[in-house]
Image: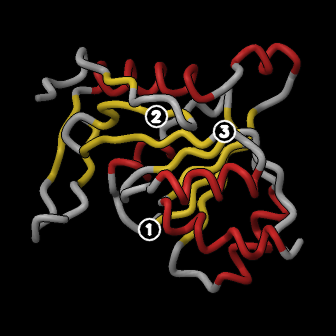
Amino acid sequence: YTCFTTSGSLGIKLPVLFSNSDWKRIILHISFYASKPYKIFLGKKTRAAIIGLVEGRSAGVTCFRNLSNLIFEKKELSLLWPIEKIIEELNTFNPEQLVSYPGVFTSLVQYKREGILKIKPKKIFLSGEVLTEENRKIIQGVFNCPVINSYGASECLVMGTKISSAPYKLFPNICHIE
């Protein structure tokens, strides 16, 4: 089994278990959805970074850690680090894809506008908090790339995604949504 915890937003963190076969299938789908896997035939990997509470075993961090090492070169950045260290690590790694919370990106906007943050990601994946349409437009405009907002829960991971201003695409094969 693969085990991680819920975020604890209801006051207590609960364990979540996925069978290894189900988990591998989920990770395979996410790996292909989030990347251009043909790059491995060219000897290249997609550089992906996560900015989050990487010290724990949350669903998002566990999912990121399990992305295929054949497809991704991965970097974990802690929200507990000083912002200067996060920016330095991002500039050095220069990720093509970034995963984090909407609030993290709204705080990075000023550093990108000022030229302190020099990265040019190709995709930004956000989850874990509400992303307003106003903030999505700002983040997408400043970083000049698609913003993918995922809606999910630890118990079933991604229930739906919203790419830029398109409506949410729900995944009813993953869980029942009413």
Residue 60: give x, y in percent of width and height: 40, 49
In this image, 136 relative to 21: left or right? right
Residue 98: give x, y in percent of width and height: 64, 50
Residue situated in front as seen by the camera: 60 or 169: 169
Whole-Å distance between the Cαs marked 1 and 3? 24 Å
Q: Residue at x 87, y 63 (%)?
A: 118
Determine which residue is flagged by label 2.
162
Residue 25, placed above or below residue 128: above
Residue situated in front as seen by the camera: 114 or 133: 133
Q: Residue at x 31, y 21 (%)?
A: 171
Q: Amino acid at mark 3?
A: Pro
Q: Residue at x 67, y 49 (%)?
A: 140
Residue 104: give x, y in percent of width and height: 55, 68
Determine which residue is flagged by label 1.
53
Label 2 sits on a secondary structure element that is: strand
Residue 127, placed above or below residue 42: below
Q: Earlier in the sequence, mark 1 or mark 3?
A: 1
Q: Amino acid at mark 1?
A: Leu
Label 3 sits on a secondary structure element that is: loop
Q: Quadrant of the C terminus?
A: top left
In this image, 89 relative to 79: left or right? right
Label 1 sits on a secondary structure element that is: loop
Q: Amino acid at mark 2?
A: Lys
Determine which residue is flagged by label 3.
146
Quarter of the rendering containing residue 53: bottom left
Mark 1 in CB contact with mark 3 (< 8 angstroms): no
Q: Residues within 10 Å of mark 1 (few under 14, many from 20)?
A: some
Q: Residue furthest front?
A: 134
